[in-house]
């Protein structure tokens, strides 16, 4: 059984005086022990809301959450806040894009780390301090004993993200959710942090749910990839399969629109037309239809089902998937 | 002669202290001796990591910040020394497109008003009707409907706003457009639209671009020539393809190896040069080669002597004492770039408070025997400490401080802090409305950039 199993997760914001807005609209995916699973998609497609829902960190009011999310067989969505908090300390952990805002600015790093160790691992005093230094060392922060005394603003962005990762892995969680952990960092620092995450997964067997808008990051890191569009997964596959054969018109278009460092100069990009604002509700049809080159009338008859038009386990939510032309047609 | 020539341009910001901020305690060497040439009709791409001085250089060219030293020769005239009166005439011909399209557009002005403002200021079009006609043409060029004229910035998507930003530059019929991170605020699928648009416009209107961006893939895609900046100066410059095919400066090599490519085949095969530590503060740049505190090949000479940008053939320029040896493979690594080196770095870290060394295992490092070699990095702790201090200084104007009071109310305990923050994040916060502040100093109508006011007050303050 999968460590985390998410099925038809939906999140709707129901603020008074505003139209209900569905941020996550039926997202399903699994994360196995020791696996790295990517949620990738553009701004506003529901990545962060998905992760917050899993962590039980959505606001208590004005939100409707539907579907199922089981962690180790236990339903996260119906768990009591108290129990969830215990889970968050010990089994589930999360890191955010902006480490500065996830750290308490007026408390030294050391205190923040030892607090976690005291609360969740029962370590006290000197033992907790020693383990804290160990952790910082583990994530590649030089001179950890000195760093422990410093405040978050005294650390660089990369160091802060390391500190946050140290805190997240302090209790050897089984699942780490990383929401754009490197987006705010420079690319050479990003490379350092991605290596660190890889190392954690390899050595500790931690499962990682990697949330990012960067397909390059996904290509190097994730075993399994889910491409989200307007709150739904539109394509899911193993990383090699997905990048070799992007089959949903959106994923296909996305890969065609990214300038690649290794592409010869002068090769034009093929953008996707319009923007995410041009969409229809999934209930009425395919949300991508207004931007899609493969669109037909069938696309407007309700949400397209997930099918496996190309390979087993490669799921695509599209009625006209992008498939290689049949041989006869090519030769004709 | 090139259309735009920079010769040893320096922009140093004084760091002020004291109750009245009247004591200058040092300088931020944001741009520290940059020379480059932009040819008419071509695109010069400037890349580098956050804080290396890209934006400051662009603003310096437009004289939106004071140039401390050096020449900015545009079409034969040195702008750096031009009196403000005369500079106005050149402002029209040099336009800027900003990263944050919403922040640089006044939310209370409709598109016609935004676009015609600059035209009127520069005396383009004899009346509003004529200007409107011209604007309509430009709107069509950038792919916006004519009915956009009476609409307001917030009614457009990010990509459309960036088109408005481009149109605002185009209506003034400039020769050069400086694009500062023109696509980095945009969604991936929309980035390509804007990149293509910039390329089409260049083709049809003969524009010259200076494109500033941190995304090397974007820069590589649109540039004829690329300059790589590190801590205020160029470390390498080459034609786009040559730079990609054979980066010569250690920093460029590392930068390029760090850019993720959306292709697992490439990602799995790549050799990554992982740099140690962070960018030093530009308020206290390392002596000698500015990269020597992180360079995997740094030698004694590197800390003492600053390398100059030198042409090594075919317009490929590099600022490194040992570029030839590194290319020939005859120089041994002095700093680890790989997994085997982790323990060694720790040993070094234990010797002194060394802020700048971190080792993270590389993906593949098998064939680099030199990594195991002893490292002789005796960075004195005094320098490291000075760096840390300078860093704190530089940070003083960062949003860190502004943030602190708000955050101080968050419950103690990291877990809760994270939670509180997560909650805060789920709110769809509209961008701060500082267009008024932007307008205040926009006496030259073409630059109501949101952070312009900040820079102004820093200057006068
Ligand atoms: N508290 C909230 N109330 C109302 N709408 C919200 C709230 N939080 C998020 N949303 C909306 O839900 C949608 C999904 O947001 P989410 O933050 O998950 O996007 P994302 O995929 O993480 O994007 P990004 O890449 O920009 O981080 C957005 O349209 C957003 O405006
Ligand atoms: N008005 C100013 N006063 C003082 N320091 C400044 C000012 N403007 C910029 N700086 C400093 O100069 C350095 C270079 O900044 P600049 O904005 O040019 O970098 P950049 O390369 O554009 O970075 P980014 O990629 O983050 O935009 C930074 O250290 C910055 O803090
Ligand atoms: S379902 Fe139709 S509109 Fe949607 S992606 Fe497939 S072809 Fe395009
Ligand atoms: S001059 Fe020295 S420190 Fe600088 S890049 Fe070359 S080898 Fe590295
Ligand atoms: Mg998000
Ligand atoms: Mg900048």
Image: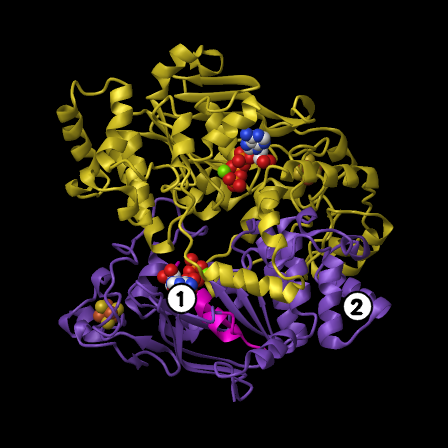
Chain colours: A purple, B yellow
Residue B150 falls within the magenta-colored stretch: no
- Relative to A143, does residue B460 appear above or below in the rendering? above
- Work out whether B87 lies above or below B162: above
Badge 2 crowding class, 10 Å Cα cut-off, few under 14, some 14 to 19, many 20 or more, is some
Residue named by callout 1: A46
In the image, residue A43 lies in the stretch drawn in magenta: yes
The location of residue A224, given as percent across then percent down, is: 47, 74
Q: Which mark is residue A131?
A: 2
* Span shown in magenta: A34-57
Q: Is residue B366 above or below residue A93?
A: above
Asked where in the image residue A104 lies, by quadrant, the reply is bottom right
Measured as percent of width and height from the top left, residue B79 is found at: 45, 15
Q: Nearer the viewer, residue B174 or B233?
A: B174
Q: Is ligand 1 less than 8 Å from the beta carbon at label 1?
A: yes
Residue drawn at the location 75% of the way across and 34% of the way down: B303
- Which sits in the foreground, A276 or B110? B110
Horizontally, residue A289 falls left or right of residue B410, namely left
Locate ligand 4 by image quadrant.
Answer: top right
Q: Are marks 2 and 1 in contact (CB under 8 Å)?
A: no
Residue A197, located in which quarter of the rendered image?
bottom right
Q: Which mark is residue A155?
A: none
């Amino acid at each position: 059984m999968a460590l985390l199993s998410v099925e038809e997760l939906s999140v709707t914001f129901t603020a008074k005086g505003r139209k209900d807005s569905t941020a996550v609209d039926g997202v399903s995916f699994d994360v196995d022990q020791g696996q790295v699973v990517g949620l990738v998609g553009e701004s506003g497609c529901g990545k962060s809301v998905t992760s917050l829902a899993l962590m039980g960190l959505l606001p208590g009011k004005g939100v409707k959450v539907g579907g199922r999310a089981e962690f180790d067989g236990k339903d996260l969505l119906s768990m009591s806040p108290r129990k969830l908090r215990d889970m968050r300390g010990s089994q589930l952990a999360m890191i955010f894009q902006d480490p500065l805002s996830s750290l308490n600015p007026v408390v030294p790093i050391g205190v923040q780390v030892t607090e976690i160790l005291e609360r969740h691992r029962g370590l006290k005093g000197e033992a907790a301090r020693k383990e804290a230094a160990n952790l910082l060392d583990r994530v590649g922060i030089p001179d950890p004993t000195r760093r422990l005394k410093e405040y978050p603003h005294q650390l660089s962005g990369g160091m802060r993200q390391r500190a946050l990762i140290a805190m997240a892995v302090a209790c050897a969680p089984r699942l780490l959710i990383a929401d754009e952990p490197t987006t705010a960092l420079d690319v050479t620092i990003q490379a350092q942090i991605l290596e660190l995450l890889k190392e954690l997964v390899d050595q500790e067997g931690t499962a990682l749910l990697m949330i990012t808008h960067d397909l390059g990051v996904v290509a190097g890191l994730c075993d399994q990839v889910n491409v989200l569009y307007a709150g739904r997964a539109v394509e899911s596959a193993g990383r090699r399969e997905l990048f070799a054969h992007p089959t949903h018109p959106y994923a296909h278009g996305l890969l065609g629109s990214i300038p690649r460092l290794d592409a010869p100069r002068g090769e034009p990009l093929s953008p996707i037309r319009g923007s995410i604002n041009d969409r229809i509700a999934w209930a009425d049809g395919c949300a991508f239809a207004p931007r899609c080159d493969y669109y037909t009338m069938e696309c407007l008859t309700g949400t397209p089902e997930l099918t496996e038009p190309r390979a087993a386990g490669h799921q695509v939510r599209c009625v006209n998937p992008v498939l290689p032309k049949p041989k006869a047609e090519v030769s004709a | 002669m090139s259309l735009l020539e920079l010769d040893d341009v320096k922009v140093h910001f004084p760091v002020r202290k004291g109750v009245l901020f009247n004591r200058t305690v040092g300088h931020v060497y944001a741009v520290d001796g940059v020379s480059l040439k932009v040819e008419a009709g071509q695109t010069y791409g400037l890349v580098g990591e956050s804080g290396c001085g890209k934006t400051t250089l662009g603003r310096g060219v437009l004289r939106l910040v004071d140039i401390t030293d050096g020449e900015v020769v545009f079409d034969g005239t040195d702008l750096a020394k031009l009196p403000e009166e005369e500079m106005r005439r050149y402002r029209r011909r040099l336009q800027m497109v900003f990263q944050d399209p919403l922040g640089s557009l006044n939310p209370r002005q409709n598109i016609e008003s935004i676009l015609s403002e600059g035209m009127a200021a520069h005396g383009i079009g004899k009346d509003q009707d004529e200007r409107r006609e011209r604007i309509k043409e430009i709107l069509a060029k950038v792919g916006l409907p004519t009915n956009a004229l009476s609409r307001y910035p917030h009614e457009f998507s990010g990509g459309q706003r960036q088109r408005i930003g481009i149109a605002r530059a185009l209506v003034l019929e400039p020769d050069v457009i400086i694009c500062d991170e023109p696509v980095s605020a945009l969604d991936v699928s929309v980035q390509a639209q804007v990149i293509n648009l910039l390329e089409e416009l260049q083709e049809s209107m003969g524009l010259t671009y200076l494109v500033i961006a941190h995304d090397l893939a974007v820069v590589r895609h649109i540039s004829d020539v690329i300059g790589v900046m590190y801590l205020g100066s160029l470390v390498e410059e080459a034609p786009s393809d040559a730079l990609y095919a054979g980066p010569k400066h250690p920093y460029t090599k590392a930068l390029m190896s760090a850019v993720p490519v959306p292709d697992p085949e490439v990602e799995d095969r790549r050799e990554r040069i992982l740099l140690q530590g962070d960018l030093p503060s530009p308020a206290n740049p390392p002596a000698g080669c500015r990269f020597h505190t992180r360079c995997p090949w740094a030698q004694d000479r590197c800390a003492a002597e600053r390398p100059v940008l030198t042409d090594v053939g075919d317009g490929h320029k590099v600022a490194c004492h040992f570029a030839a040896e590194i290319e020939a493979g005859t120089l041994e690594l002095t700093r680890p770039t790989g997994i085997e080196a982790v323990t060694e770095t720790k040993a070094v870290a234990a010797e002194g408070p060394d802020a700048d060394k971190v080792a993270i295992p590389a993906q593949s490092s098998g064939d680099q025997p030199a990594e195991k070699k002893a490292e002789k990095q005796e960075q004195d702790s005094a320098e490291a400490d000075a760096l840390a201090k300078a860093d704190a200084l530089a940070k003083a104007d960062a949003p860190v401080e502004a943030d602190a009071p708000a955050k101080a109310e968050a419950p103690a305990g990291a877990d809760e802090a994270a939670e509180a923050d997560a909650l805060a994040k789920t709110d769809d916060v509209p961008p701060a409305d500082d267009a008024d502040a932007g307008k205040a100093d926009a006496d030259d109508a073409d630059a109501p950039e949101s952070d312009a006011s900040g820079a102004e007050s820093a200057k006068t303050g």
